[in-house]
Structures are given as structure tokens and as C-alpha cells.
Amino acid sequence: MTKKPAVVYSNVWEDPELNRVSLKVQPGQNVLSITSGGCNSLCLLLEDPAKLISIDLNPAQLSMLEFKRAAIMELDYDDFIESMGTPFLFKPGKPAEYRIELYNRIKKHMPAYAVQFWDENQNHIRDGIMMCGKVEKFFKIYRTLLGFLYSKEDLMSLFKAENLEKQREAYATFRKKRWNALHRLLLNRAVLSLVKGAHSFAQVDFEDFAGNLNVKRTRGMTRFFNPDNYFMCLLMLGAHYHEKGMAPYLLRENYPKLKANIGRLEIFMGTIGDVLKKDGPGSYDRFNLSNIFEWMTNEVFNGIIREVLELARPGSRMAWRYTFARPRELDAENLSHLVYEPELSEQLFNQDRAFIYESFHAYHLK
Ligand SMILES: C[S@@+](CC[C@H](N)C(=O)[O-])C[C@H]1O[C@@H](n2cnc3c(N)ncnc32)[C@H](O)[C@@H]1O
């Protein structure tokens, strides 16, 4: 029996601001973007490219983006937000049946494979597709366990500070022993491999995932004001704190542009090599490569970069990141075509609100 496709990420847990600033999409350019939950492809659509191809190998991830696209095509802003069950801490959503009604209105815009996926997974629509991925479900278990260890009041003290300075103080005095113990129990290679697959961690050199993530937690808690940081809010509270603290594609003020540009989005199942076969050399200007290189050997990585270089037009820009793994090394041939931008990469890494990453890499074509 073949395994049914499942959503791993219903959100992209990568800061879209890093893509926006590093890729510098110019109106009229063609963009290639890894799909995951579709969020960052939709955010790049706000930069007015002529065309954006969003690719993935997992049909469930593409179905997620198909749902979001269909909702953008058909619905007004409030229903768009409602259709995904976008969670807000202080505002309850409408009943599950309403989301099914919206789905029935938007499905005419989806291809057959996506309709089949959502027909078979209507429970996700009832619960809200925005938190239906395996990663999001894992975060829910994390929150439940955290809720056994701390009172709601204790946890909310990290979100209720009136400014970042006060939040830092609240975090500094927060009793972290139990939190750290939970991390040791939950955030290790064995458990994380169950969520994301063991291959994801094949290139990680260290074993102390909990220690690594404790440092990153401190970074997140001390650099960014939590109510505005939707990554921290979705992870720790399971909801947005307020309507302004969301990914750009979800913001009310960006909706007219998103609707206007949605026809420029192509959703494609396949690899970068498949795009090269379909569209031919020299057909893209910007590349959001997410952290697809996380698990790859140097050889596979360099092979994909060669395909990117073939697809790239003069002046192309590209960016990628790693969550835990050490960066792969470009071979001499690839290096001769690419220029690394260390200052920009470092600056953007330091402002990464998604805070769980190990490194960020921005390049342009020589
Ligand atoms: C690399 S994962 C990372 C997810 C991300 N860090 C996030 O927070 O959403 C993103 C997506 O890339 C897809 N993917 C991985 N390797 C790929 C490849 N070579 N070509 C196209 N998609 C790929 C996966 O199916 C997954 O949906």
C-alpha cells in the first residue's frame, strides 16, 4: 500500500523578511520558491514578480498552497483568514461548518489532486488548516506538556511585558529548569526524527539538540518583542497575538495586492531539475531555496546548485538556510560563478524572528 501524502508544514517557519531583503525581487522578474506551507511563496508574490513558480515534491504541501491560492481568488479578506482557521489568541474563529462551506466555495479553483486531498482530509479544514501539519501538531504536544509544567499565568508573563526590555527581564527571571528538562526529553535526535524523518538530521554534527535549541530560545526571547513575533506566538501559544503580528501575506493591508498578483503564481510538483527541463535555461532571476540542503551530501548539494546556475539569468540572487546542519561547501566550479554576501547574510541571520536556524546564506551570480 502506498503511503498517503501528509502535510508536514502547514506554515513556513522561516522569516519571509530574510527572503525579501536578500532576494530584492524587482518587478517583472521570475522567482522560484520552495513551497513548504506556501506562506513564503505568497509573501514573495507581494514583491510584484512577473511570475513565481512554487515547487515541492510533496503533493500535500502543494495542496496546502492550492487551498490558500483558491481562497485568495474567491474570498474577501475576512473569509480568507477564516477559511484557514487562522488562530488568534483573543478572538475565536467561526464554527467548523463555516470553514467547510468556504472550502466548498473555493474548491472550483483547485486542481483534482488538491480537491481529492482536501476531500479526504476535511477534518483538517474543520480544525483549521493553518495548524494541521505534523510539525504544528508536534508543537501542540510541546505546548500541552509545557502547560503541565507551568501555569498559564507564568507562560503569559513572557508575552505580557509592555516592551522588549521588560520581556527580557521576565525571561531572565523565568524558572527554566523544567522547561530545559522538557527540551531534553522532547528535542533529541530520536523524537525529532519521528516528526521530520531521520534523513533530515543526517548532516548534523552534534547530539545536544536541546542545548542548541535552548540557546536559540534565548535568542528569540531576548531579541524580538513576542506579541509581534508570530513565530514565537504560534509556537508557544498556538495563535497570533494580534492581527498586525502575522506573516505579510495574511495582513489585511496586503490583501488587495495579493489578490491582484495571484494569477502570477504557478504551483509545480517537482525539483529544480524538473523546472529546468520544463522552462529551459536562463528563465529565473530569484531563488528562495528554504533549507532544502539540510540533509544533502556536498555532492548532491553541488549538483542542485549547478541546476540553479543553469536556470539563472544574469544578476540572479539566491538564498538558503540551515536549521541544525553545518553549511554545505560549494565546489570550485560552482564557486567560480557565485558571490557570497557575508555581511548581508550575517545581518539577516541576526534579525531572524524564526530564531531556530543555524545560519542564513545570501548569494548572487558573478
Ligand atoms: C526543506 S523543507 C523545510 C521547511 C521549512 N524550514 C519550514 O519551516 O517550513 C520545505 C519543503 O521543501 C520540500 N523539498 C525538499 N527538498 C526539495 C527539493 N529538492 N525540491 C523541491 N522541494 C523540496 C519539502 O517537501 C518541504 O515541503
Image (cartoon, helix red, strand yellow):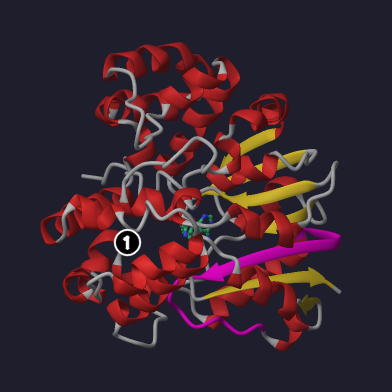
Residue at 39% x, 37% y: name it: 130
Task: Identify which amino acid the numbered label 1 is placed on.
Answer: Lys
Q: Position of residue 209 (x, y in %)?
A: 31, 78
Q: Can residue 356 be seen in this view?
A: no
Mark 1, other Cα within 10 Å: few <14 / some 14–19 / many ≥20:
some
- Residue at the spot of label 1: 196
Residue at 31% x, 40% y: name it: 132
Residue at 34% x, 58% y: name it: 158
In this view, the residue in front, 61 or 75, is: 75
Which image quadrant is residue 257 in? Answer: top right
Q: Position of residue 313 (x, y in %)?
A: 84, 58
Q: Report the span colored magenta.
A: 311-330
Which image quadrant is residue 24 in? Answer: bottom right
Residue at 32% x, 61% y: name it: 196
Taking the image as shown, residue 275 lies to the left or right of residue 171, namely right
In this view, the residue in front, 24 or 219, is: 219
